[in-house]
Image (tube, rainbow, N blue to C red):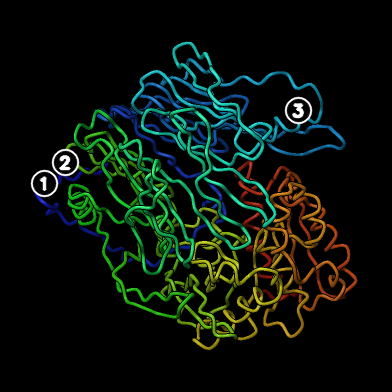
Amino acid sequence: MKKTRLAFIAAATFLAAGTVSAAPPVRPTIEQLAASAQYSNFTLSPDGNHIAALRGDGENQVIAVWRTDAMTQAPTLIGSQRMKIAGISFIKNDRLAVSLWQPLDLRADRVYKMFLSKLMITDLEGKDWKEPLPQTRAASRAEELAQARTSASVLDRLPNDPNHILVINNSGSNAGDVYRVDLRNFKADRIQMSEEQVAGYITDFDGALRARLKQNIDGIGAYVSAEFRNPQNDKWEEHFRSYVKNRDQTQIIGLSTDPNIAFVMSNEGQDKSVIYEYDIAARKKKEVLYQHRFFNANRVIVNPYRSAGEDFGKILGLGYEGPREDDVEWTDPKMRALDAGLRQALGITNQTLNIIDPATGQSANINYPTQKEYTITGYTPDMSTILLTVDGAASPPEHFLFRNGSLTSLAKGYPNIDPRSLGDTRLVYYKARDGLDIPAFLTTPNTELCGAGPWNAVVHPHGGPWARDNMGFDGSMWVPLMASRCMAVLRPQFRGSEGWGRKLWMAGDAQWGQKMQDDKDDGAKWMIEQNIAKPGHIAMFGFSYGGYSAFAAAVRPEGIYKCAIAGAGVSDIKKIWSRFYTNPFFRQAQAPTVDGLNPLDHADKIKIPLMVYHGDRDQTVPIEQSEWFVSKAKASGQPVEYHAIADYAHGPAWTRAIMADQLRIIDTYLASGCGGTGL
């Protein structure tokens, strides 16, 4: 493990030395891309005495636990025989919360091929496993199905209570009932019986349920209400009501040490959300804590530990949805000094980045770490021990420990992947045909490996569509796969994408396959104009909503694509909503925004070769959505390739072999399929 000593006054003076390899870049194999990370999911005990992580072990992952004062010694390894370990987190100094999963075939009205998830708690040697909330025996097949689709989760690890955590059962409603679990005897006391409309709770520093969100409908339409619990009568009282059709979002995101002050995030009356303080008793908005000119403000980072003394409850920093989506501006002087030192030690530098506001067209140049950035994943109350991860689009995750002034490299997530082969990713903007500025993440290949452009190219829309991409490492491995195979990849943040402001988000309403699709096509044309993409050598590949986009690309006339790949795509937008959005809130909130081109209606007239793949355990987009389209598309005369992947859901892959199969069919199709000659 590499260790560097950092001497802090206002900032560290050490600058990490980089090494440059003279050997040419090496593209990763399918097996290297499909492998589990060598180490991932690092978590730090509250007292800073232990670190745990997931270690890739062939088809499985095991838990590795170290003492922070003996990191060179072999870790304690904890495995699971029946279920696979998916994630871990310290909840107390001597307890880990562990997420596990396994395939499940459940017969109700039909056979549901799905995955079962479970939360367990274990000691640091893996000898004492407990289920925090054992489920009662299901009284019917329907109840059994509901239980299988939900799992308990930790609502609050109660950092100031050594013996208890809050757990929510997530069964039968959006939020479920809340239990206070004693980790000494695993007695669970229900402290809140929930209601069907509850969408989440907010706790204070002592774990008291102080605020919550509810979904409901009134004469105006679907809305989300924010409620506070009145300490005088213990009743929930509504303070805000945000109507979904306006895409208003007013949410309680935290509480101050002052019991009467809450932190509220809101975009009411503006394009971007801001964070302000709120006087609960007076029902009055106070000063704005944070507002970013170009991006949504989204979180307040506070020190939750009472043992931190005068730093308890102090605001350390404020977050916003910038290019990395989880960007932070540190406001506490100690954190600013620490941040400056860590950046020097890690070799993180800023570059000039031009950003544009889609709502106004205004632009600015900012200093931003475009190549890689660090994220704090755990810290002790006095900040003397900090766990952090560094990554970037072409920098697979690397994990570090900062302890008592020393910075230690713990592990690289994917040491066998040459980061130079992953190309260069940057945030760009291009004009849609109606003048709207569309953000996009453009990845161009390494010129030493692939030569100068233009290159073969792929337009790669994200799922959702109420989602977005970012500049972090793509753990799906789709972008690393394509970039290392010498393809330029454009990930457009088309209208309908969330996280770039209200205007861009709402501009996608009822524009499925129409203006939303125009944005993707305009991105392909922009790549040609910029001499990035070869004309006639552009494909579209997407998954989920991105799969819908690939179906739409195949049926739209006068398309720009040579071929398309649809992973788990929605082909019939009418049936997908009638089946899954039976909840009246979602019928009013999102269903009206889903309108436009229905690809299945035109599947027998596709214009380009198409490859489709879908997992047989997908409970988000049922596999029949692909089967319907493929069956009809075969009458078009175009080459249609279909792969049903066993034991694959809507992600992630159950085994490394399944992950490799998925990547291989994409790689093979772009290399030699796509109409028979490759892209």
> Where does the image place residue 308, in percent across and percent down from the top left?
23, 32
> Looking at the image, is mark 1 or mark 3 earlier in the sequence?
1
> Where does the image place residue 163, in percent across and percent down from the top left?
40, 18
> Where does the image place residue 57, in percent across and percent down from the top left?
51, 36
Asked if the residues shown at circle 1 and circle 2 are in contact, with their CB atoms under 8 angstroms apart, the answer is yes
> Looking at the image, is mark 2 or mark 3 earlier in the sequence?
3
* Residue 626 found in image quarter: bottom right
Residue at mark 2 to residue at mark 3: CA–CA distance: 52 Å
Q: Is residue 391 visible?
A: no
Please rate how many residues cluster around mark 2, counting C-alpha atoms within 10 Å: few if below 14, some from 14 to 19, many from 20: some
**What residue would you read off at disc 3?**
144
Q: What's under tag 3, amino acid-wise?
A: Glu
Q: Can residue 3 be seen in this view?
A: yes
Outermost right residue: 635
Q: Is residue 416 left or right of residue 630?
A: left
Q: Nearer the viewer, residue 595 or 480?
A: 595
Q: Which of 76 and 216 is in front in this view?
A: 216
Q: Is mark 3 on a helix, strand or loop?
A: helix
* Residue at the image position 16 percent from the left and 41 percent from the top: 405
Q: In this view, does 281 lie to the left or right of 28?
A: left
Outermost bottom residue: 529
Q: What's under tag 2, amino acid-wise?
A: Gly
**What residue would you read off at disc 1?**
7
Q: Determine whether 467 is above or below 136 in the image.
A: below
Q: Is residue 599 left or right of residue 121?
A: right
Q: Is mark 2 on a helix, strand or loop?
A: loop
Report the mark closest to the observer, 1 or 3.
3
Say the numbered circle drawn on residue 405. 2
